[in-house]
Image (spheres, rainbow, N blue to C red):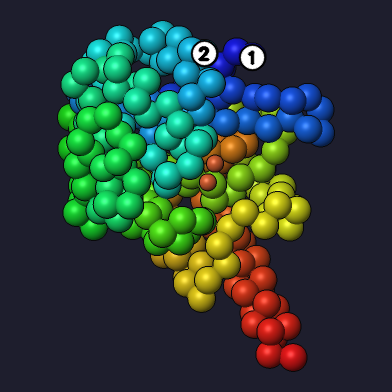
Amino acid sequence: VETQIAEISDGIYRLSTCIGNGAEAFGFNQFLIKADEPLLFHCGHLAMFPTVSKAAEKILPLDKLRWISFGHFEGDECGSLNSWLSVAPHAVVRHSSVACMTSLNDFSQRQPVPFAVGEVLDLGGKRVRQIETPHFTHAWESQLIFEETTQTLFCADLGAHGGNGPAAITSDIVGPATAMEDHFRSSSLTPTTASTIRDLAALSPATLALMHGSSFSGDCKHQLLGLAEYYQNAFNAACKTKAQ
Ligand SMILES: [Fe+2]
Ligand SMILES: [Fe+2]
């Protein structure tokens, strides 16, 4: 298994490791934001650290990594967090205060620093805004980030789809993403799921950096509103079933 590298926005690199073949193929992506103070979003599984870190090293020396963040506390998001901290002595873990309180103060070998809600982190040349999204797509501590200079939204599991497609596409992701959600039901379906996605659509991102599947460039607002409609319908249907 080899990690593929692609620049999906100016200075934003997707590190992608695909397991399985054909219809069973499924990719795990990390994103490296190159800046004066580089930031890694998603660490990847512990078992994938050798191949992912080898790829990251082709973009920048690992000891230059300054910030590490991710969507929520889960193996593919942060299983290798402590391995990254070992090779990047200046790296600081940033996450929601809930993530720090519930898991990271215990799990991280270096003390994490909580984000203030909506805090903007100036990386020098790039600017990352934290977006707190409790229980979205799953887990209380969840957050996303938005890189303001390239208008790139880092979606974690939102829009996840399978296959081993190109690094970036301009074709529809709503179809493949909702087919995957129909199958796995990985999202927490709450009264605020659809409105959270509509709030993300209001950012009008230029690129959606997805943890699983191809990144999307183009009319991201349209794609996000399509996903919001899917989750709104799913929530309404679940409420109706419960009421019967
Ligand atoms: Fe997840
Ligand atoms: Fe994931």
Q: Residue at x 56, y 17 (%)?
A: 4
Cα distance, mark 2 to mark 1? 8 Å
Q: Is residue 14 left or right of residue 18?
A: left
- Local secondary structure at mark 1: loop
Outermost residue on the front side: it is 106
Outermost residue on the right side: it is 23
Can you see residue 222? no
Mark 1 packing: few (<14 Cα in 10 Å), some, or many (20+)? few
| Mark 2 and mark 1 residues within 8 Å of each other at the beta carbon | yes
In the image, what residue type sits under mark 2? Thr
In the image, what residue type sits under mark 1? Val
Q: Which residue is mark 2?
A: 51
Q: Which residue is mark 1?
A: 1
Q: Nearer the viewer, residue 139 or 54?
A: 139
- Give the image location of residue 181, x and y in percent: 68, 54
Q: Residue at x 43, y 26 (%)?
A: 80
